[in-house]
Image (cartoon, coloured by chain):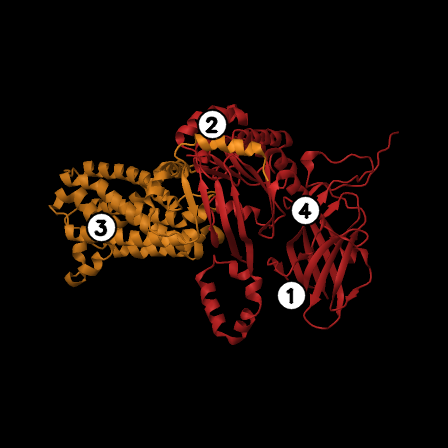
Amino acid sequence: MNSVELAIKKEISGGHLPAVPHLVIQPGITRSPLNLRELWRYRELFYFLTWRDVKVRYKQTLLGASWAIIQPLFSMLIFTLLFGKLAGMPSDDIPYPLFAFAGLLPWTFFANAITTSGNSMAGNVHLITKVYFPRLIIPASSVLAGLVDFAFAFGVMSILLVIYKVPVGLNILLIPLLALLTSLLALAIGSWLAALNVRYRDIRYLVPFLIQLWMFATPIIYPPSMIPENFRLIHALNPMTGIIEAYRVALLGKVNGAQINWMSLGLSTVLTLVILIYAAYNFRRMERTLADII
Amino acid sequence: MPIPFAIKVDNISKLYQLGEHAQITRTFRDVITDSFDRLNPLSRKQKNGNHRKESELWALSDVKFEVRPGETVGIIGRNGSGKSTLLKIISRITEPTSGRVEIYGRVGSLLEVGTGFHPELSGRDNIFLNGSILGMSRREIEREFDAIVSFAELEKFLDTPVKRYSSGMYIRLAFAVAAHLAPEIMLIDEVLAVGDAAFQKKCLGKISDVARDGRTILFVSHNTAAVLNICDRGLLLERGRIVADGAIEPVIQTYLKSLRLARPHDLTICSERQGNGRVRFTSARFEDERGNIIEQGISGYPLVIALDYQSSDEQYLPNCRSSIVCFDSMGQFLFNCTSDLVISDPITLPPSGTLRCIIPKLPLSQGQYLLNLMLAVNGEIEDRLHNAIELEVADGDFYGTGRVYLDGWRGRGVLVNHEWMVE
C-alpha cells in the first residue's frame, strides 16, 4: 500500500519524539466539571486572549480608558444626590459619596464582567468553529480583562480616601482576596449566561435587566443594616451581599469602626463555589456540542 | 520507544441535524411556540411524518484508518463528502457521534488562515495572538518572529493595525504565521484557495518542506495537483465513507473518475428555500448536449441544466416562469437565465416534470459557481432556492484559440464572445 520510504520516515520521526503526548477523542467525555490540567496547559492562550481584550477594549473610543472611571464616578454622583441628599438614605455614619463608591467599585466590575463574559461566546464564534481550546478560557479572559478597569476605579477610590482623610486599616489587605472572590462569582455567572446564550439569544436582553434587579438586591445604595432582622438571612443568600459588605469594611472600616461580617462573607464564599462548580459543569456539557450549534 | 501510529481513527461517525430542527440557537419564544405545536395534533402528525429522517445527515459513517508518523495523507472528495467534518473531529472542534480517535503527538490544525486576527491590533500583536491561538508557545513565536515577518514581506507594516492592510497583505501575514507552526501532526484544510498565484506557490512550497521534514500531515484540498505534490497517500471520501485508501496517484484517478459518474443533486433536503411551496424543485442535474449527466461544465461547450419539479396536486400549472441565477464563488451576481425573456407566450406546465435550460456555449471560466433556482406560477413564487447547486466549470477552449483565462481569475470570469478589428 505504501512505499518503503514511508516506513523509513516512520522510523526516523518515531525515534526522535520525546515524551509524545497521547490524546483520545471519544463522544461524551465529561468526567470532571473542570479539567484543570488542560486549562493549565492552555494558560498562554488565556493570557493572550486576556491581553487582546484589554488592548482592544478602548480602541477607537474618544475617552479611552477613562470610561473605566466615568461609569462608577457618575453613578456615585447621581446616587449621592438622589439617595444621599434628597431621600436621606442612612449610610452607617459614612459620608454618602464614599459609602456609595465603595459599593459601586466592585459592583461595576462585577456587572461589566458578567455582561462581557455572558456575550463572549457569541462574539468569538470564528475561534470556536476553527480551533480547539478549553472554551472556558473565553468567558474567563473577559472577566480578567475587566480587572484593569477595576484597578483604574480603585485609583479613584484611593483619591477619595485621601480627600476624606480616611485612615486605612489592615483590613485593606483583604481587597485582593475579595477581588478574586468577585472574579470567581462573575466567572460563574458569566459562563453560565454564556452557555445559555449559545442556545438562547434571549440572554442578551435578559442580562441588563438582571443586573438592574440584582443591584437593588445588593446593599450598594443602602446599608445592610436597613434590612429587617428576619429578612437578613434571605438577603445574605445573594452572594454579592457579603462581598460588598466586606469591601466596604475593608475600605472604610476605620470611619465607623465596623468589623468584617465573617458569617456573611463565608456564606458568600460557599455560595460562589457552589455556583461556580455548577456553572463549570454546565459549561462543559454545553462545550461538547457547541461548535455544531453556535 | 517508537510509537505505533500518529493518528488512529476508529469507526468514527458523525450525525448532523438539518433543516428547521437544526436551528438550536433560538429564543425562548420558539421553545414556547414549539411546545404549543406539540400539543396540536395536526402539526404533530406533520412532524412525525418522514420529516425526522430527512432532517438527519450522517456526515461521516464508520470511518476507519490509521496514519503512521511521517505519513502525508491527502483527503479528497467532493463538497459535502465529510472531509472537513473529519478534520474538525480530529482537531477536537466537534465531537464524533460515535467512534474513537487516538493521537500520538502534538496536533496543530489549520482550518483557516488568520483565525482570531483582530482588526484593531497591529501586525506584530496579531502574530502573537494568532500564533498562540494556533497552539504555538510564546517562546516559539518569539523565536520564529523574524522568519514570519520576512516570509510575509511586511517588515514596514508591523505596527500598522491590520484593518489598514490590503486583503493580500492580510493573507500573507496570516499564512506566514501558520507556515511556521511546528507540531508533529499538521491538519490542513482547504486554506490555499486564497491569495495570489505567486503567494499560493510559496505556501505550497512551505508545506512540502514541512512534509519532507518527516512530519505527519493530513491535507484536505480540492486542488488535486497540490495534493499530489505534497502527499504520499490518499483517502477518498464519498458521502461520509472511505471509498479508496492507498498511494496518492491511483486514489486521485479514482476521484477524477467518480466526478464523471455524476448523480443528480437531491433538492428535497435543501433547507434554504422560500415561496408558497405548492410546487417544488426535487432534483437538478447537469447534462451535455446528448443528455448524458455530467458533473462539470466546460467553458465554451453546451450545458443543459435539468430541473425536476413536483406539484402537490394534479392541476396543470398556468402562466409559469422559471429562472436560474448564477453567482461566482464570492457571491457576486453574474447572470440570470429567465424563461419569460426568451419565451414570449405564457408557459403551462404539467403537475410534474422536468424543465431544461440550455446554454449552447457556456460562458464561464474555470472555477466554482453557485446557482439559485426559482419557479413562479401565475406571478406567485412557489419555490426559490438559494445556492441550490454548485456548478463546477473546467477550462475549455471558449475562443477557439487554445487560450484560457489567467489563473488568478478563476471562478469569477464571464467569457464574452467578441472580436477585435484593426483599422
Quadrant of res A141: top left
Q: Which quarter of the image is occupied by the C terminus of chain B?
A: top right
Q: Are marks 3 and 1 on the same chain?
A: no
Do the dots labelled 4 and 3 sit on one chain? no
Subunit ID for the residue under disc 4: B
The amino acid marked with disc number 3 is: Thr
Q: Picture quarter containing residue A159?
A: top left
User: Quick one: which residue is furthest to the bottom in this view?
Assistant: B41
Which chain does the residue under circle 3 lie in?
Answer: A
Say if B45 sits above or below A30 in the image.
below
Mark-to-mark CA distance, 4 and 3: 59 Å
Q: Secondary structure at mark 4?
A: strand
Label 2 belongs to which residue? B159
> Residue reaching furthest right?
B423
Q: Position of residue B369 (x, y in %)?
A: 68, 46
In the rendered structure, are the residues bearing label 4 and label 1 in contact, judged by CB atoms less than 8 Å apart?
Answer: no
Q: Check the residue under mark 1 and report the chain it is in.
A: B
- For mark 3, what is the residue? A269
